[in-house]
Amino acid sequence: MVVCICNAIREKDIRAAVREGACTPSSAYARMGRRARCGQCVSFAREIIQAERATA
């Protein structure tokens, strides 16, 4: 599933960034060499991060 249309970031990319240590949307995006643009994806990215950290 695409999380960020502006940067073409998928849910699996966010989850992988969390497994590498990212704990916020901005740190997850930075691990991919990107940053949030319009910001509409940030709340969904937070949910994914929380879910991934809960299962770790």
Image (spheres, rainbow, N blue to C red):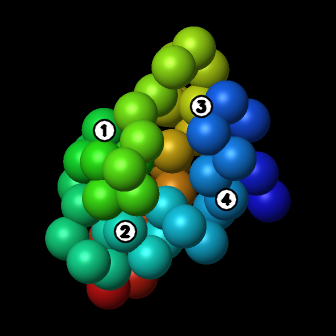
> At numbered mark 3, what does the secondary structure look like: helix, strand or loop?
loop
Q: Mark 3 or mark 1, which has the lower sequence index?
A: 1
Q: Nearer the viewer, residue 22 or 8?
A: 8
Q: Amino acid at mark 4?
A: Arg
Circle 4 is placed at which residue position?
A: 10
Measured Cα–Cα span from mark 4 to mark 1: 15 Å
Query: Residue 53 placed where, x, y %?
Result: 32, 70
Measured Cα–Cα span from mark 2 to mark 3: 15 Å
Q: Quadrant of the N terminus?
A: bottom right
Q: Amino acid at mark 1?
A: Ser
Q: Nearer the viewer, residue 42 or 36?
A: 36
Extreme bottom residue here?
A: 56
From this view, report whether residue 20 is shown above or below residue 17.
below
Q: Label 2 crowding class (10 Å Cα cut-off): few <14, some 14-19, many 20+?
A: many
> At numbered mark 2, what does the secondary structure look like: helix, strand or loop?
helix
Q: Amino acid at mark 3?
A: Cys
Check contact, mark 4 vs mark 3: CB within 8 A.
no
From this view, report whether residue 25 is shown above or below residue 28.
above
In which quarter of the view is residue 46 placed?
top left
Circle 2 is placed at which residue position?
A: 17
Circle 1 is placed at which residue position?
A: 26
Query: Residue 30 placed where, x, y %?
Result: 30, 48
Measured Cα–Cα span from mark 1 to mark 2: 11 Å
Q: Label 3 crowding class (10 Å Cα cut-off): few <14, some 14-19, many 20+?
A: some
Q: Residue at x 20, y 71 (%)?
A: 21
Circle 3 is placed at which residue position?
A: 41
Check contact, mark 4 vs mark 1: CB within 8 A.
no
Q: Nearer the viewer, residue 40 or 6?
A: 6
Q: Amino acid at mark 2?
A: Ala
Check contact, mark 4 vs mark 2: CB within 8 A.
no
